Image (cartoon, helix red, strand yellow):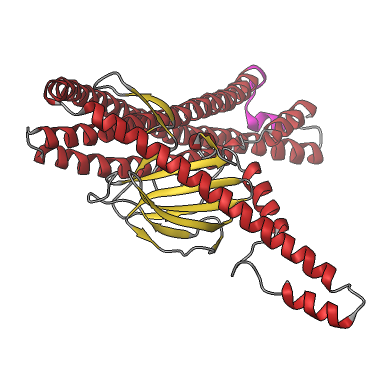
Amino acid sequence: MRILSLLLLMLIGFSSSSMAQTYEEKRKEILNRQTNTRAEINVLDARIKTYQQRIQQTENRYEELYKQYQNLNRLISLQDDKISTLELEQRQIQEEIELTESEISLREKDLEQLKQNLRDILLYTYKNGRTSNLELIVTAGSINQMVIRSYYLQKLEEQKEKQAEQIRIRQRELEGVKDDLQESLVKNEIVLSEIRDEKVELSSQQTIQRNNVEKIKAESSDLLSELRTIRQQRENLESSFANLISMEDELRRAENERLERLAAARNIADAARRAEEVAKYSTPTRTYFVSDETLAAYERTFAASKGALQWPVDSKTVSKKFGVTRNPLYGTRTEHPGINIVADPGSEVRVVADGYVFAIRPIPGYGDVVFVKHGTYYTAYGNLSQVNVQQSSILRAGQMIGRSGTDASILGESLFFMVLKNTKNLNPEDWLER
């Protein structure tokens, strides 16, 4: 009796694995991330197709060839981004595969334990069941013992069937998880194939690019003039920015000095002189003024956001990077004060942090530029096809300030973006979210 009771408790106490729900939740999270990554890939695909169409429409004249070179440069940047994003998706799928394989291992152990339990029951029955159930009941020493034996024998038979049913259920669940694994493996193979195809396409575009470079090298006669122009444009931009910052600081000093003198005038004891001095300093030196406290708050927020600022357009593809760059056509070196971000024509341009517009200027080589002050930090947004703010506008992070360039803009379908600390140029990619 005691053995039968212990066996029954062992069977009742055995519970199924509770990890199925955790697995489903984890897999759902991975699939959601895959969906978002695939959406990014689709956006990159759309941009790639746009530039592919333009490349097909170009002619072999130098001007058209150089435009083709610029578009190919952007296309290669986009394809590089797509390959990186595809590889991210492939890593996410691999994570899903590893999670599913781990779940299969757990469920196989669970199933094996259930089978072992059933084998133990059958072995026990074989070793101890030489007499029939009827004989065990009939040979009972009392009615009470007969009832107890009958009860436990019935429970033992029920547990056998229950154990067998649990095994069947676990087998079906295991098959379902294996189907998930097969689905993940198929997805993985598709993405790997897409990566291979994209790399072949990228290699083809790079070959075209190299051919174009050779053609442009042979046909170009005004490189030095163009190089001087680019350098002059950069110097004009930096000089204009420095002058604007100097003017802004001078106006701020004058306004703060006026406020201090007005406060002092209000404390003059003589009423007539007080009225004269108050009137003298009551007129603001400017029509708008952002307090030093507000600027300090802007600066703290901006400084704390390094590496986390939202991109000013819905694109993270940089076609021209910050700093000294080497011209792949001629080997010459120029210094770029910001970055050029490839964007759909006329995309919304948004300010990256709280601040206020202290200047809007057309700058040769950069088109219309909006300058925003964030304390001692500054950002500039150039090559705008449309400006939606005015000087002195107070801006909140994410607020639209205009639209990016179009095919008719000086820098084409892109946004020029700068970050400065006082008058020192900083690498914008160090500040933007990646």
- Residue 342 relative to residue 250: left or right: left
- Quarter of the image with the N terminus in it: top right
Can you tell which quarter of the image residue 156 is in? top right
User: In this view, which residue lies farthest toward the left?
Assistant: 60
Residue 269 visible within the image = yes
Residue nearest the observer in this picture, 198 or 260: 260
Q: Position of residue 407 (x, y in %)?
A: 23, 49
- Magenta extent: 127-139
| Residue displayed at 28% across by 35% down | 74
- Residue 6 relative to residue 113: left or right: right
Can you tell which quarter of the image residue 265 is in? bottom right
User: In this view, which residue lies farthest toward the bottom?
Assistant: 272
Q: Is residue 374 above or below residue 100?
A: below
Q: Position of residue 330 (x, y in %)?
A: 25, 20
Query: Is residue 133 shown in magenta?
Result: yes
Residue 317 visible within the image = no
Type of secondary structure dominating the magenta stretch: helix
Q: Position of residue 297 (x, y in %)?
A: 69, 53
Query: Is residue 138 shown in magenta?
Result: yes
Q: Is residue 2 above or below residue 352?
A: above
User: In this view, which residue lies farthest toward the right?
Assistant: 269
Residue nearest the observer in this picture, 171 or 298: 298
Q: Is residue 227 above or below residue 428?
A: above
| Residue displayed at 71% across by 40% down | 151
- Residue 403 relative to residue 390: left or right: left
Residue nearest the observer in this picture, 298 or 34: 298
Q: Position of residue 377 (x, y in %)?
A: 59, 45
